[in-house]
Every structure is written in structure tokens, then in C-alpha cells.
Image (cartoon, grey):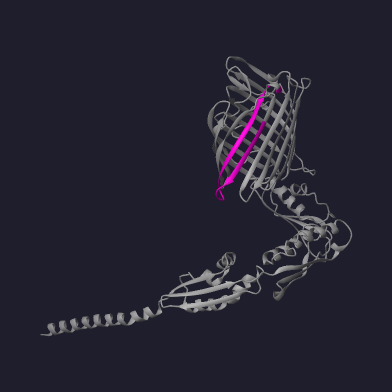
Amino acid sequence: MAMPAFRTRARAMRLGCAWFALLSMLMIAPVRAQTSQPEFSVEIEAPPQIKALLERHLRIQQLAAQPDMRRGRFLALYQGADAQIRELLATEGYFSPRVEAALDQMPERWRARFRVDPGEPSLIRSVDIRFSGPITEERWDNLKRMAELRERWPLKPGMRFRQQLWDQGKQTLLIGLANERYAAAEIAQSEARVHPEERAVDLTVVADSGPPFTFGPLVVEGLSRYPESLVRNLNRLAPGTPYSEKALTDLQEDLLGTGYFASVLVSADIDREHPEHAPIRVTVVEQPSKKLRLAIGFSTDVGANGEIAYTDRNILDRAWSWTSGLKLAQKEQVAGTDLALPPAPDGYRYGGSLQWQRTDIQNEVTTTLGAFLRRFKSTREKDSELSLGLLTQSKRISGIPADSLIALPLQYSWTQRKVDNLVDPRAGWILNWQGTAASKAVLSDADFARGYAKAMGFVPVGRRDTLVLRGEAGAVYAPQPRKVPSQYLFRAGGSNSIRGYAFQSIGEQVGDAVTGARVLGVVSGEYVHLLTERWGISAFIDAGDATDRFNNFDFKLGYGVGVRWKSPVGPLALDLAYGQATEEFRLHFLAGFVF
């Protein structure tokens, strides 16, 4: 009889637990309902520009949609919104706004409403820009600089006061002083005196130049494998040179351009108490001395290609840079080795190279073996190179006896750049010219003289578009053109020449081949319109010719459209062009910016 009683008690306990759980749920449910949060929103009624300003910066607007928003926090934001609205409007010159606020508190929705009338803006009534310190002395270009800085002040009388321009103006004054001589310049006083009842603002700024600085000794940090002379030979800032921010930047870019350093920081130790001979501090992170480079690619000019190159920048622990490599493409194969010394005290580098090259272009096969001595210098804005080469070359055209030649050409090349971006320019220009000569009297099979020039211009149009203009011209004096190395003659056509025509297909016709000619002229115009930050479209027209005589010159026209992509590795271009002379369409693909 004990077992049934036990079962009865167990059943009663289970029923009791179930009723207790149900009762607990019924008790907790109202509590949860009471603690659930309503939906929060903000409504702003104001002129479009003011509404956009408030929607971007008003704190209650930014935080209302956050999932952890609560009634108490929303109420606090609402109570502080009036003051914040007035502060935001003051940054745009509205100092007497009318702000009406209301808070709708419904069980499922809380809504903060603001009606804003900014009123009339306050305008700049007067601008008083004063200078103190040695900048006021009548020496150097002080008077001119002060006049230019006053002229560049962005807030002119009659303009609406804007906090952004007020801050920008003071920063411009500081930078204008600190960039040259006065590295410790500071704003000694600034006041924007607002008269709300008159809707007027009077501006006063006093800029203290501080003492004029001069450069002192060079201090180099971070070197372990490369000699300190590598840095010192590129420094043009002798002790006593007037301080210049641009000079420091130029030195930094020159050091980075050598390839020896992964990063470079150049600065001067600025101390108002010791303005003379401020030390120049150069801190570097060295590149590894050894590097192996592997690359594969494709272009519509030379087809698929691959490259392998090995570099050692510290031969004999003297920072001599040696590179050997092999490049294989469908139409071109190159093997070579190059040795370059570090920059000398005058900034020039000296080097020598050996190169073997084979090309098969437009049914002309050339094989070249050359040795070259070079003297060169490269900066951000300018390159120059003087070279002397000894080369032998064979030229073969089907059905015609092969030509062999020897030449000792002397060449000078000079390039000037004034662009906003070296990788993907949008404004500025680039110019290159070359002069080359060889003589039968000095180890050459033929006399020849060559002149060549190329220019590109970049004109920004609006915020995104760019007009790109390009032109190149060249001429060779050579009584025996077949005895001139092919690289010193001219051909046209291809992705970076006259689009719509095959690579180097315009030149002098010899049998079934196109060979180099003695006269070149090419002009091009292209309009690029960016659809997004990275993608764009273009329309272009190219024209030109490569021929053996000026009186045979006949412009070949090519035109079409293309797609542009600012990829992470550089700009890419895909063009569809129509060659009017051949009546053919042709695709052109170009990776990177090529001058």
C-alpha cells in the first residue's frame, strides 16, 4: 500500500510545480511589457542646408536609432539639443535662431520634433590681420609675404561667417609663415567678435612669426647596413641655409627615390630659444639589401609576359646596387645586368650595364647586344641621364639579306614633371626630350643624329573629369637608315601611341615588314569622366605617322572609347579603337600610367 501513496504524492508535486511555473510566467510577462522600450525618432523642420547640417551633426539624430537607446538617455539628449542646435548654427554664421522643440511620448514611439528658423546670417564687417615679430622687418621677402597672406585670407568683408573658414584662415597664416624661415610661428591672438543685433562679425588675428630659423648639422638615425654617406651626399642643406619645409620634403623624397629605404622621416629640431643652426634629423628604415622579383602580365602590345629579377643593393658593403633579370614576352625577350653606384656628393649616380634583346615586331626580327655607361640623376620633378653605349645589332626581314651593324651612340635625356600625382596624374604636365648621335669616325658603321620630344598635359575638369593631351615628335638624320640601330628610329601604333592600329605597325614598309622610320609625329586628346571614385569612361582621338621623309607624312587617325579603373595596384585602361586607315577595330589594354 506504500507504493501507491508515494506515486500520488509525486504526481501532486509535479502538478504543483507546473502551476508554479505558469504563475511565474504570468507575473513576469507584465513586468517585461512594462520595461520594453519604445521606438525613438527625430524630426527636423528647417531650410534644406540647415536641415542637412543638423542631420549630420545633431547628437540626438545620430544616436536615436541605436538598439541600446533608453527613455532616460533620449530625454537627456532632447533636453540638450536646443543648445547644440544653436552652437551648430553659430558655426555657419546664424547667431539669432528661433528653435521650437516638442517631445511626443507615446507608449510605442517617442518622437523629438524641432522646428528651426536660422534667421538672418551675420556677415563679416571687418578683418584685421596683424603680424608681430621679425616678419615685420623690411628685409628678405617679408613685406611681400605679409601682403600675400592677407590676400589669401578666406573670410572677406561681406561674406557670411563660417567657423570652418575661420579655422582654415588661421591655419593658412601659420603654414604660410612656418613653411619658410619662421618655423615656430604661432597665433598670438584671435577674436571673432559677434554683434547679433547688427548681424555683423569683426575679425582680429595677430600672427607672431617667431625668430627666423636656419638649418644646422645633419643627424642620421636608423642606419645599420648602408653607409651614412648615402644620406649625406643627397643633402643640399648646408649649415646656415634658411629654414624651408619644402627643402625638408624634397630631401625626404630624394632619399626614398634611391630605393635603399622603406621609409624616411626628415625634420628639423625647432626651438624658439635656439633658432640658428637647427639640426636636421633624418630617421630611416632600411630596405633589405637583397630582393627577388617575379612578375607575370599581359598587354595587347607585346602579349603575355613574365619577368624575374634579382637585386642586391649592397655589393661589397658599399651600397653598390646590382640587378640582373630576364623578361620574356611573345614579341620581346630581354636579359641584362646593371650595376649602379650610390649618389655622389653632387647627387649624380654612375653605372654600367650589359643587355641582350631580341624583338619580333611587324615581321622584322632584331637581335641586339649592348654595353652602356651611364651618369644619371633622378628627383621627384626632374630626371636627367647621359649615356654612352657600344652595341651590335642584326636585323632580319624575310626574303631580304640580314643587316648587321655596330654603333657607339652618345645620348642625353632630360625629363621635367609638374604633376599632382606621379602614379595617376590629374593636373600638370610632363616633358621629355632626347638627343642622340653617333659617328663613323668613332666605332660606328654609320653617321646619325636623332632628336625626340614628348609632352603630356593634364587638365582637371570639374570635380572628377580630366582632359589628357599628348604629343610627340622626332627626326633622325641618317644617310644610311638601315645602319642605324632600330631603337633610335621611329614606329607608331599601339596602346600608348596611335590606338586603332597594331603595336608599331606604322613605319617604313620594307618587303612584308614595317621597320623604323626617320620622322615621327603623334598628337592625342582624351577626355576621362569618372562615374565613381574608381570607375570611369573615356573618349579619345589619336593621329600621327612615322615615315621616312617629311613630305610623305600622312596623319593616320584612330578614335574610340574606353573604360578606366583606379585599381589598388594602379590605373588600368581598356580601349576599343577604330583605325580609319585600316578600317579595323582593335582592343588595347594598358596597365599603369606610362609616359
Q: Residue sitting at 79 percent across and 44 percent down?
A: 345
- Relative to 345, say whether 436 is above or below: above
Stretch in magenta: 522-550
Q: Residue sitting at 65 percent across and 70 percent down?
A: 120
Q: Position of residue 153 (x, y in %)?
A: 75, 61
Question: Is 262 positioned to the left or the right of 130 in the image?
Answer: left
Pick whichever, 485 or 147, lies toward us. Answer: 147
Outermost residue toward the right in this view: 138
Question: Is 588 positioned to the left or the right of 7 in the image?
Answer: right
Question: Is 518 positioned to the left or the right of 577 in the image?
Answer: right
Residue 306 figure quarter: top right
One can see residue 20 in this view: yes
Q: Position of residue 84 (x, y in %)?
A: 60, 74
Q: Residue sitting at 60 percent across and 43 percent down?
A: 528
Q: Is residue 337 magenta?
A: no
Q: Is residue 549 magenta?
A: yes
